[in-house]
Image (tube, helix red, strand yellow):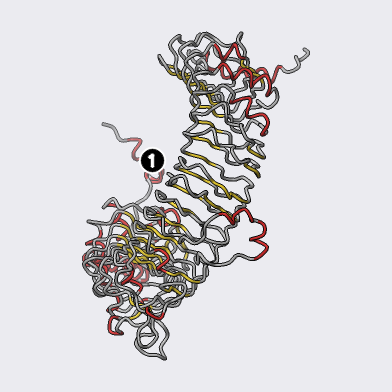
Amino acid sequence: MQSVPGAGCLLLCLLPAILGAQAGGEVKPRPPPCQQNLTKVSCRAAGLHSFPEDLPQGVKHLDLSHNLLQNLSEGCLPALGQLEHLDLRSNLLEAISGPALAQLPWLHSLLLGSNRLHQNYRDNAVAFSALRSIEVLDLSANGLESHMVGGFLSGLTALRVLHLPRNRLSQLPVGIFQGSPQLTELDLSNNYIMDIEEGAFEALRELAVLNLALNSLHCLSSFSLRQLQVLNLSHNALELFGWEEGRGPYLLQVLDLSHNRLLSFPQLPAAHRLVHLNLSHNSITSLDPGSHHPAQFVLRYEEMVSFSTSQSTAASLTRLAELDLSYNCLQLLPLLFFRAMSSLFTLSVAMNCLQNITMELLSRDGDRDSNGTAVWQEDAVLSVRSMDLHGNAIRALPHWFFDALPQLEAIDLGSNSLQPCGSDMGGQSGGGSPEAEPCTAFHSIPHLQHLSLRRNSLTQLPPHTFSRTPLLSLDLSENRGLAVPWAALEGLEHSLQQLWLRGNHMDNSRAEIPCLGELRVLDLSGNRLSLLPTGLFCSPLQTLDVSGNELPVLPEQALMGWTRSLRALCLAENPFQCCELGWLDALQAAGVQLPDLHRARCIHHSITNRTAPLSSRLPWLCPQPWAGSSVLVLAALLGVLLCAGCRVCRLRGQGVGILLPQPQTERVAEGGAAHSDTKV
């Protein structure tokens, strides 16, 4: 018999159906490619090559994204006269016909991102003229170039939101958006735009949100979009940003200039409504508005001569609430630069090259005392409540620093070279002694609640370091070899709720933590503790991390209190004893979450220090405890057996035989005849 080619493969394909039929069941039909209700239909990623048939007449929202559609023509489009939203993103669309779009008179939102509309851009642009009611249009990632875009927008007078990211735009010529004067939101990010001709946005009188991020812009010297509220220019190559003066104020509230090449703080003379300003990841070296640029830099931007530089850079930023200057090249931080920013709430100068914090760039003689020391002006306080100074080279804060920031609630001073002063040192730089290392006082700061001193090479906290400062959270992590004596945290007993001591390599003698009655979160991971500080036993902990230590057990005294409050415990990378895990049973019985239990192991000391997963310990390897009465009974039983053995041996030595019970078969064999004659 000759085999049929491919029969084996066919059999494998039909086998599930055959088995299902034999089992008395029918083959389940594939679920329909579309999910729908009266007004919404979703055929997302259904493998469609054409529009689905039998769509409800009243459908208003249709999702055909992530399919294989190649064209949109009149013949393949069903009657969808009430359709308002059409999603055709991530298809293979190359051609769209005008008559097809004309059948959608109520269409308000059309999403065509990630298609191939550049292939027939002239015909496609003509077809778009039928979209008289369109308000939202997504043309992202369609390979469109600058000269193609104007045709698509011609006649779209109702358009309010336009997305054009991830195309091939290299410039924005005059008139490109003239056909859509009602635009309020425009996304041009992730293109290759190097040039914006003057007047390119002139027709857009209603534009409020403009995204030009991820382009190749080098200079914006005549920015004149006064009605704009949000402007994103991040990830460009800007070296200069300037405003046009006169003709009223700007309405801009959010300005993102991060990830550029700015050399100085931008001139913003009329930004009276600016609330958020992001200048991070630039090359700003000074906040001095009068600092001079290199000669070659000035010559490249001669058109900026008309801009006034006499006005203070920050004088008009009275509504600014958030300023990000992180990842720049600042070496000096003059606090009076921010004096005019009366609404400034958050200030970040992290990851710079700061070594000193001063009042002004050039201190005046009138601001110094008789010893030549700068004196803070009492009326020059700042409104900042949250400050980030981590990642600098600050050795000490000026003694007037916290006086200048009376509303400060949170400050991150991580990754610097600060050393704290004790409350008995008077809070002066240098600890009151000219020969001493400079230190910073963190006590008696009335509103400070959150403080980070991680990675400052701290070795010792002096007594009462934070007294009369109502800290809620304190981070002292990654200070290798840090010693925390009992008196260091005194004064925080009734306020501190979160404490981080991670990665300090502290042994038992260096972690003397007092009773902190409000402590909820504690991180002791990455140390060398074999015992937990007893002062913690009174704390109502909710989250505790003791991973990466040298703990053999967790103390019962602590568990008695923690099982009522503890919610999560991290405990991996400790040498727990496998035969002393009663504490683990107590935690699990209390419902405490152990997120890293699968990584935790314990040691069986009885079998050459063999380790086992803590989650699947083997209790039979542990010696079982015996009660005293059981031991006595066992000893008595062994004694009886030994005495009986001795007696048997003695009787055998005297020639006395011992009659042992014999198997039944042997007894029958020996006395078989006598038993055979017995009658009943």
From the top left corner, tell me how far across and down residue 280 is, in percent.
51, 57
Image-quadrant location for residue 612: bottom left
With 443 as the anchor, is 361 left or right in this view?
right
Task: Kindly identify the residue that appears in the image at 30 percent across and 61 percent down.
Answer: 583
From the top left corner, tell me how far across and down residue 321 is, in percent.
38, 54
Give the tally of numbered discs.
1
Q: Residue furthest right?
A: 2
Name the one closer to the observer, 306 or 464: 306
Task: Kindly identify the residue that appears in the image at 49 percent across and 23 percent down.
Answer: 158
Quarter of the figure that contains the N terminus: top right
Task: Kindly identify the residue that appears in the image at 64 percent across and 47 percent down.
Answer: 216
Name the one closer to the observer, 398 or 223: 223
- Residue 625 visible: no
- Residue 511 visible: yes
Name the one closer to the observer, 12 or 84: 84
From the top left corner, tell me how far across and down residue 573 is, in percent.
44, 63
Image-quadrant location for residue 561: bottom left
Name the one closer to the observer, 467 or 112: 112
Task: Kindly identify the residue that appears in the image at 32 percent across and 81 percent down.
Answer: 427
With 17 as the anchor, is 209 left or right in this view?
left
- Secondary structure of the residue carrying tag 1 is helix
From the top left corner, tell me how far across and down residue 631 is, in percent.
26, 66
Q: Residues within 10 Å of mark 1 (few under 14, many from 20)?
A: few
Quarter of the figure that contains the C terminus: top left
Residue topped by disc 1: 672
- The kind of residue tagged 1 is Gly
507 lies above or below 449: below
274 lies above or below 284: above
